[in-house]
Image (cartoon, helix red, strand yellow):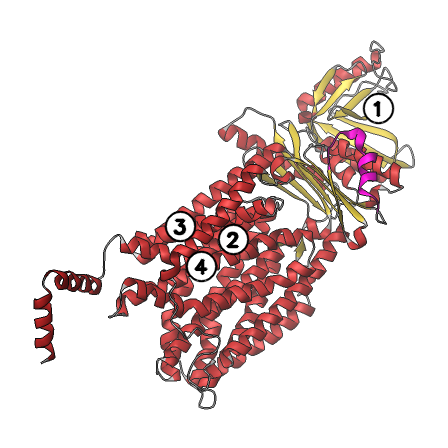
Amino acid sequence: MNHNLKKVLAVVFVVIIAVGWYLTLFGVGKLEPIQDRMKLGLDIKGGVYVVMEANTDLEGDELREAMEQTQAVIEERVNQMGLAEPVVTIEGEKRIRVELPGAEDAQEAINQIGTTAQLQFALADGTIVLDGSNVKKAEAAMDNESAGYAVDLEFDSEGGDLFYQATSTAYSGTVTSAIEGVSNDAVMIILDGQIISAPSVNEPISGGRCTITGGFTQEEATNLAALIEGGALPLELQEVNSSVQSAKIGYNALEMSVYAGIIGLALVMLIMLIAYRGMGIAADLALMFYVLIVINIMGFAGSVLTLPGIAGFILSVGMAVDANVVIFSRIREEIVAGKTIRVAAQQGYKRAMSTVIDSQVTTLIAAVILYEIGTSAVKGFAWTFMIGIVVSIFTAVIVTQLYIGLLAGSRKFSKKQYFGIKKDGKASFNIDRELHFMKHRKVFYIISIAIMVIGLVFGVARGLNYGIDFTGGTMIQMDMGKQVEISDVKDAIKEHDLNPEIIYSGANNEQIVIRSIVALDNNERAQVIDTINESFGTTDENVVAEELFGPSVGKELRNNAILAIIIASICMLIYIRFRFSQWKFGGAALLGVVHDVLIVISFYAIFNITVNNPFIAGILTVVGYSINDTIVIFDRIRENIKYMKKGNTEEMVDTSITQTLGRSLMTSVTTLIVMVPLLIMAGDAIREFVLPLMVGIIAGAYSSICVCSPLYYEFTKHNHLSKYEKEVMKKKKNKKKYPGIVKEKKEKSTK
């Protein structure tokens, strides 16, 4: 590309970045600022979600059709509530997830969604006369006879006939009420076994239409119409998972996460400048462009921003930095080898690209599987992570290459100091001495085995600390307004037999979190909350969050975690085999993945950390990150096999690790640095995601260097030798058998 054209494009990119950030932050005309375009998840905005499971023996197409019909009816019901952007989705085969962001009265929302959601019409003696499937339409309308509202009903043809028979019977006076408060001439409307209306019949009603009057307010008429119209569900549903989130804790966590992200990003950009000088400026511009693209993709695509999603985005920043670090490391190696700046930039970039693509694609495989198999919170994490990986490849290929080429072609800036090369000709932040990892590989094996054995001992003796996400159970979080004694709370709710774990949370320990493996439905949770309110003078407004996790959900999480790891490992093994043409690389990488998973599990077992939903995201991200680091080293080993003429396999592997060690440490450090502010500043929800990721990053960096590479060496050593090694071994054998001949040949060769 022409140098002048590069200058023009470089200026254009700077303008795009500057204007793009201005439009993103402040908007213009019909383009709203990003904070208005970005949809906020329940954990930030507050609201309620319920996961319901169908009790049915249907299978295959019949089940799918019934679930889709049920989904449509529930959508109609929640749309009547007037909430912003309710979401109703089918999860798996038999579950429906309902999300209601911004629901102010969570209890009322759950009650209106219902659990079994079966609508029936009955006479006063309890005789069922028709059900919700016969209802065509229900809507609120003005009451022409009084200054209020009424509900207009319309039935299908079958329902019209049945309703006429029912009203005729009720009007005849032959029915005796079996329910207190219900008149003999009433037709009861029953939802989930509860009477939601019992209007008296003034006359037999034909024609398939009727009006329910009673001096309703507009809100009462609207709610009743919504319940009637949305009550015709083909399947009986049971609540298996529900959560109530207040907006207060979410907004605080969001604010702290944004601040932490800005601090982490600034630290990474500073490190890149110090380590790579002029190339660091190129990396920082690419990073600014990267962040700009990712947040706008999420905004325009209608992605829902969740707290786990923020963690995924910030982790992807570390992966974006990694692509630049790999490129810069190769360019500096070419410069140190004696090539001109321009040639070094071209050759270094060319050699780095295969490594960048291989490492990012293997990580992307793990992210895709995480998205496909994970639950809602994990999907939010995986989605932002996937977007970040794809965009990072784009910025590394386009933006970074443009500015590096511009620097290399400039008379003023095509000097070694602008490429992170010191006056003595050595690269800054680089390992210059030859390190012998293979020599100490048995020590590394012992360290890893020792950690896993200790983890196994703790895991067997004490067991993993499974949270309610896995065991099933209930969580209630309340803002008490002051610090209360944990023992007092336990005494207050003793009558409910929860055997709870109660901990402090929030500023000044003014919040309490009650966890129990007893699964309480919506009404049972309300009773516990009422007990606390009576004992401590709190109200329902003090409820920060509440959640139900059914045992079947926890079992599914465990199964999905195992399945995801197996599928991800197989897919990555196939990809590595395809790219590297040897099973030895894939086998060593796969064992490294198993090692990292076991190390993280051991960490949880030793320190008794709660194993919850974020644990799955952590494990699968560890799988992807570990492979990323390993691929970089293996790519260098593959290259050195071709180009190294001297030395044995042990020396070649040591050399390959040493050559990539600076990059491995830099990537790990930058990824950890961007996450440290999150760990310190963000809320508990973010920390649950960040902690396993940080442990996994450390384990992944260690295993790539000290486990996977030595394992590859072990496989190679016991498989076959290189041509050079075979010649060396042949000479050694000849020397033992025929020392005189070898000596004579040596003397002749010296003459």
Q: Residue 45: x percent and y percent?
A: 72, 52
Mark positioned earlier in the residue sequence (2 or 4): 2
Task: Kindly identify which residue carries mark 4.
Answer: 628
Residue nearer the viewer, 113 or 655? 655
Task: Give me the C-alpha separation between circle 1 and circle 4.
Answer: 67 Å
Mark 3 and mark 1 in contact (Cβ < 8 Å)? no
Task: Give me the C-alpha separation between circle 2 and circle 3.
Answer: 14 Å
Q: Judge whether 427 appears above or below 435 on screen.
A: below
Residue nearer the viewer, 252 or 267? 267
Q: Residues within 10 Å of mark 3 (few under 14, many from 20)?
A: many
SS category of the residue bearing label 1: loop
Task: Kindly identify which residue carries mark 1.
Answer: 199
Q: Residue 742: x percent and y percent?
A: 10, 68
| Numbered circle sitting on residue 178 | none
| Residue in view at x 8 percent, y 67 percent | 740
| Numbered circle sitting on residue 590 | 3
The region drawn magenta spans 484-500
Q: Is residue 332 left or right of residue 728?
A: right
- Inspect the image, locate mark 1, and give the three-letter code of the amino acid beneath it: Pro
Mark positioned earlier in the residue sequence (2 or 1): 1
Q: Residues within 10 Å of mark 1 (few under 14, many from 20)?
A: some
Q: Residue 601: x percent and y percent?
A: 53, 46
- Inspect the image, locate mark 4, and give the three-letter code of the amino acid beneath it: Asn
Task: Kindly identify which residue carries mark 2.
Answer: 621
Task: Give me the C-alpha separation between circle 1 and circle 3.
Answer: 68 Å
Dividing the picture into quadrants, the one containing residue 224 is top right
- Inspect the image, locate mark 2, and give the three-letter code of the amino acid beneath it: Thr
Task: Give me the C-alpha separation between circle 2 and circle 1.
Answer: 58 Å
Mark 4 and mark 1 in contact (Cβ < 8 Å)? no
